[in-house]
Image (cartoon, rainbow, N blue to C red):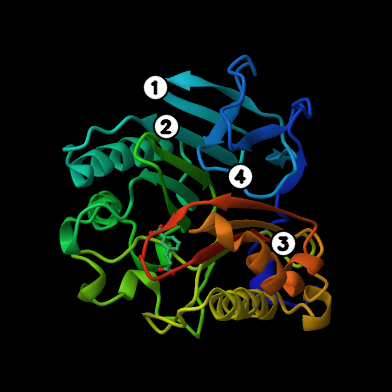
Amino acid sequence: MTSSAAQLFEPASLAARIAAADTQPGNNELMRFCFGTKPDSNSASRCIIHVPLPRLDDSNTCEIWESSEPVSSGVSGGVQFARTDSWLALHTTTPLMADDDLSIITEDIYTRLIKEALSQGYTDIVRTWNYVPDINLGSADTERYRQFTLGRAIAFDRLGFRDSKLPAGTGIGGDASIPLSITLLVTRKPCRRVENPRQISAYNYPKQYGPRSPSFSRAVLIGNTEKPLLLVSGTASIVGHETMHTGLAEQAGETCANIRTLQDVAAAHLQIDKRMQATGQGTYLRIYLRNDSDTDAALTALQGLIKEAEGYVVLQGDICRDDLLLEIEAVC
Ligand code: 3EB
């Protein structure tokens, strides 16, 4: 291998896949996302993450993250954890009351989770998933999403995580009854961030979107040319910092263009031929739609992306800007 950049990285010892919901957990399962209805809680001591959003596709699947290393897991201080030598997953849920201060609650949870990871020697937070009840409740800077973003930014900032140290992220809303659900994926060695030249970095968004900018990178690249894994943040129809288009099909097209750009930039980092990347092998999508009535139209508009993917899940979720109709995250 001649690429000096890629030599800094080891092969990814982590992979994701979509599998039947009743798949028995193997010894190397780090975490599992279950969608729609709550899974049985007898699934032993694995890190099980319930994504409490209505499912809009008709398959009964889950998303399994496995490592090439053995996994140990448990619950400590209300936090579910699973870890290998390289990887740590942390997951917590918190019920919210209508008049709770979401910025303080979020700051507390993030501070606790980040400190926990750092104290165990896992220093690079590569991915977060955040599910927030009633995410568009409130107006202007009192909006739930903006309060969440404020608390998260304070916690990350205070612990030294800024700009290109920030993880890839997802921030999606569910109905008023879901708990605040936060999941972190953390590793020991620094991984490469990938930003999107079509978009301003989220952490540089102007103040019109809230008192603090959102704490996430557009994508994080794990592993080397031999075995790369690209964690693509929730991606929407945003160019620069502005929402583009009001129609679903147009927003879907712009979102696909953003995801493809991130794949191309990551491929360039790895010096992989673009045509190899274009096969989309091993790509999994999580598609969030604001309106369940858009499901058929979305599947049609996203045909190209879906055809290249090995699997996908469609969920009903509120996107953090009220003018966005869909958001898609990907593992490539
Ligand atoms: C965007 O690009 C769309 O606040 O964690 C996408 C992914 C979005 C993550 C978050 C928000 C978040 O700004 C919204």
Q: Nearer the viewer, mark 2 or mark 4?
A: 4
Cα distance in 3D space between marks 4 and 1: 27 Å
Answer with mark 3 or mark 2, whichever residue precedes in sequence: 2
Circles 1 and 2: CB atoms closer than 8 Å: yes
Q: Quadrant of residue 110?
A: top left
Cα distance in 3D space between marks 2 and 4: 21 Å
Answer with mark 2 or mark 4, whichever residue precedes in sequence: 4
Q: Nearer the viewer, mark 3 or mark 2?
A: 2
| Residue nearer the viewer, 176 or 272 | 176
Cα distance in 3D space between marks 3 and 1: 33 Å
Answer with mark 3 or mark 4, whichever residue precedes in sequence: 4
Residue 117: where, in percent of width, then height?
Answer: 43, 38
| Residue nearer the viewer, 136 or 151 | 136
Query: 58 left or right of 176?
Result: right
Some atom of ligand 1 lies within 8 Å of the CB belonging to the residue at label 3: no
Position of 300 relative to 67 (above/below): below
Task: Kindly identify which numbered label has been placed on residue 78.
Answer: 1
Circles 3 and 1: CB atoms closer than 8 Å: no
Task: Report if residue 259 is visible in the image.
Answer: yes
Some atom of ligand 1 lies within 8 Å of the CB belonging to the residue at label 1: no
Task: Kindly identify which numbered label has been placed on residue 55.
Answer: 4
Cα distance in 3D space between marks 3 and 4: 29 Å
Question: SS for tag 1?
Answer: loop
Q: Which residue is mark 3?
A: 228
Task: Kindly identify which numbered label has been placed on residue 92.
Answer: 2
Question: SS for tag 2?
Answer: strand
Question: SS for tag 3?
Answer: loop
Residue 265: where, in percent of width, then height?
Answer: 62, 79
